[in-house]
Image: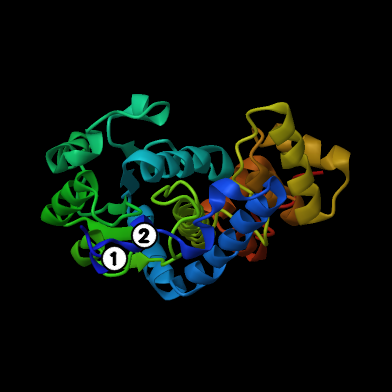
Amino acid sequence: MTSASAVGTTERRNPATQNLDRLPLPALLRTMNDEDHRVPNAVAAALPAIADATELIVDSLRTGGRLIYTGAGTSGRLGVLDAAECVPTFGTSPEQVVGLIAGGPEAMFRAIEGAEDSPTQGAQDLADIDVDQRDTVVGIAASGRTPYVLGALEHARSVGASTVAVSCNPDSAIGRLAQIAIEVDNGPEVLTGSTRMKAGTSQKIILNMLSTAAMVRLGKVYGNLMVDVVPTNAKLRERAVRIVTEATQCSDADARAALEASDNHAKTAIVMLLCNVDADTARQRLAAADGFVGQAAATPMNPDGPEGTQS
């Protein structure tokens, strides 16, 4: 029989939920909710490591590298989800933030048996996208010992990429392998071993922090506005209008006109309105300010140049 001490936290039975199948529905849901409340405090304890990992990611993206998530099962799906959401939220290219899952794209929709057991495949999936020293690879595994992720981190280290591990067990195998270990102890799951629950919630929170904080540091946020949003549908087009009006206190009509003139780029439209310049000049200001709206808007106006031509 396996001793409790030999089993990771994510695999242990939770004493508070051993009568789960006998609870009335209200009590069952309350118990789940009580356990979920443990997650934010557990993540808070890992904030210093999350900050260190974010710095690695910023350095990679700022120098032409990528943020690459790699994982299996729920962990892999969360990485793919975060990568996909960076494109419309922050205007990144699909190549800048990448999600790899054991078993490939099909594994997003159904379990691929045995896919997570191959460290060789984890390494190969990174080799296939030419990971190098400019990139940051984030290995995600609730157990902290998934072979696919271990293989990926080994390969990332071998080519000089920065490495981060996200796990839900202390002193994890992937944590020992990576430069920075983000290890969150949520306690045992409500449903024994079902890491799509508290572990998955904590991983989602951490990935939200890593990508969002990195994008803030890269100038893709102005105040708390997502000024690099890509308005690919009616909802996002209206959001872009609200972003421009909130940032500049302009009228709805002026926001729409500036967005039309700037090819629907909220960041450019904001600088146009704050500085009373045309779209080309706004783009030049943003380029000179490394994409930071506040810096672009604070640049002294040049009375001899094209500034002030916007009516």
Q: Disc 2 on helix, strand or loop?
A: loop
Q: Is residue 282 left or right of residue 179?
A: right
Which mark sits nearer the N-terminus, 1 or 2?
A: 1
In this picture the colour scheme is rainbow
Picture quarter with the C terminus: top right
**Is residue 289 visible to us here?**
no
Residue 136 is left or right of residue 267, and the answer is left
Residue 29 in view of the camera = yes
The residue closer to the viewer here, 208 or 131, is: 208
Identify the element where label 1 is drawn: helix
Q: Residue at x 17, y 36 (%)?
A: 121
**Spot occupied by residue 251 in the image (x, y as percentages of width and height):** 88, 45
- Three-letter amino acid code at disc 2? Arg
Badge 1 crowding class, 10 Å Cα cut-off, few under 14, some 14 to 19, many 20 or more, is few
Q: Is residue 280 left or right of residue 196?
A: right
- The residue located at (44%, 44%) in the rendering is 78
Q: Which residue is mark 2?
A: 12
Q: Nearer the viewer, residue 228 or 39?
A: 39
Q: Is 41 rendered above or below residue 18? A: below
Residue type at numbered disc 1: Ala
Instruction: Find out whether the residues at labels 1 and 2 contact each other: C-beta distance under 8 Å.
Output: yes
- What quarter of the picture does the N terminus occupy? bottom left
Residue at horizontal 84 percent and vertical 41 percent from the top: 254
Q: Is residue 238 above or below residue 196?
A: above
Q: Could you say which quadrant of the image residue 216 lies in? A: bottom right
Q: In the image shown, does 128 or 20 lie closer to the viewer?
A: 20
Q: Measured from the top left, where is residue 215 in percent x and y?
A: 50, 55
Q: Which mark is residue 4?
A: 1
Horizontal side, residue 117 vs residue 81: left or right? left
Q: Is residue 193 above or below residue 6?
A: above
